[in-house]
Image (cartoon, rainbow, N blue to C red):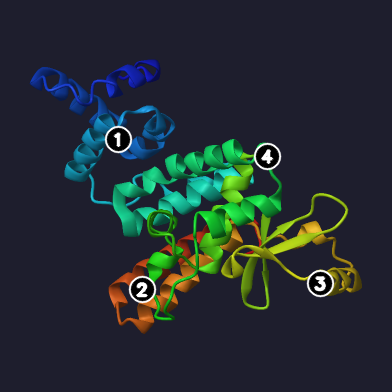
Amino acid sequence: MIDKKDLPFLLSLLDDPSPIVQQQIHEVLTELGPKIMQELMPYRSSLSPAQNQALENWLSLHLNGVPQVSWLNWLEIAEEKAALEYALTQLSCMGSGNQAYQIKEILDELAADFALLYPGGSIEQLMHFLFVEQAYTSPPEEAPNCQYDNLAWVLQHKKGSQVALSCLAILVAHRLDIPLDGISIQGNFITISFAGEKMQMFNSFNQGQPLARASVMYIEEAFRRNQIAPGEMKAEVHEIVIQILKNGIEANHRLQKLEEARRYIGLYKELIQELQYRGMEA
């Protein structure tokens, strides 16, 4: 049985050409079993490019580019932003295979770059950084495409759906201790901050620009009329995942990719059943 404290040392030998060493690594990685991705995730960012490539090669030979642990494990994660990142990583496995596990590395790099350029930066500066300087933007065409909800693909190609781009901003902001959440309003998914005296909303499809104060005040008034605290309106992780799954079902049906649509339907039903079992509102 592998001792977890030895795993970093073994991973540092991934690019060692010795057949004996490679056999030992193979045995260790195989021993990790169905939780291999979950076990490897904390160490990916510390590997060298050569070691990461060696690991990718091994995974490509031994895995099939599908989630290797129960993709619903994020429901067990108490910290909501960590749960969101885990869920999006698992969903990205379907379309991007093992590249999905580069999500953490890219998000970490974006956060580090922002912190270097804007020490103590504001939410407005973060939005400008992501959607103007880094040029993450909406797709140029309206054709359905599941990749636009695939965070791994979006991070690589810098084009994505409104929900994917908003999640990108939320996860980078979390690394910077900047309070940011998502909210679904009238068919749009935008980022929202409840910090400070005034609620702020930002549209990832408009270069991260803040919504006009008059629009925000109108939404605030709607909350008050319905006796709902603004913070209660933020999208929960399972609501974001459900939206992505529904998008995938619709897109694949429109593209006549019925097998892919059935796969998304299966994930959707599995999630709904688990939420019902847990007494959570879908």
Q: Position of residue 187 (x, y in %)?
A: 62, 77
Q: Mark 4 = which residue?
A: 177
Up-down relation of residue 149 to residue 102 (above or below): below
Q: CA distance from mark 2 to mark 4?
A: 37 Å
Q: Which mark is residue 261?
A: 2
* Residue with the mark numbered 3: 219
Q: Name the kind of residue labelled 4 in the image.
A: Asp
Q: Which residue is mark 1?
A: 33
Residue drawn at (19%, 42%), measured in percent from left and top?
Answer: 62
Mark 3 / mark 4, whichever is N-terminal: 4
Identify which amino acid the numbered label 3 is placed on: Ile
Mark 1 and mark 2 residues within 8 Å of each other at the beta carbon: no
Per the model, the C-alpha gap separating discs 1 and 2 is 28 Å
Q: Tell me if residue 224 can be seen.
A: yes
Residue at x 58% of width, y 52% of height: 129
Which x, y percent locates residue 183? 68, 64
Q: Are marks 1 and 4 in contact (CB under 8 Å)?
A: no
Residue at the image point whose x is 85% and y is 65% from the top:
228
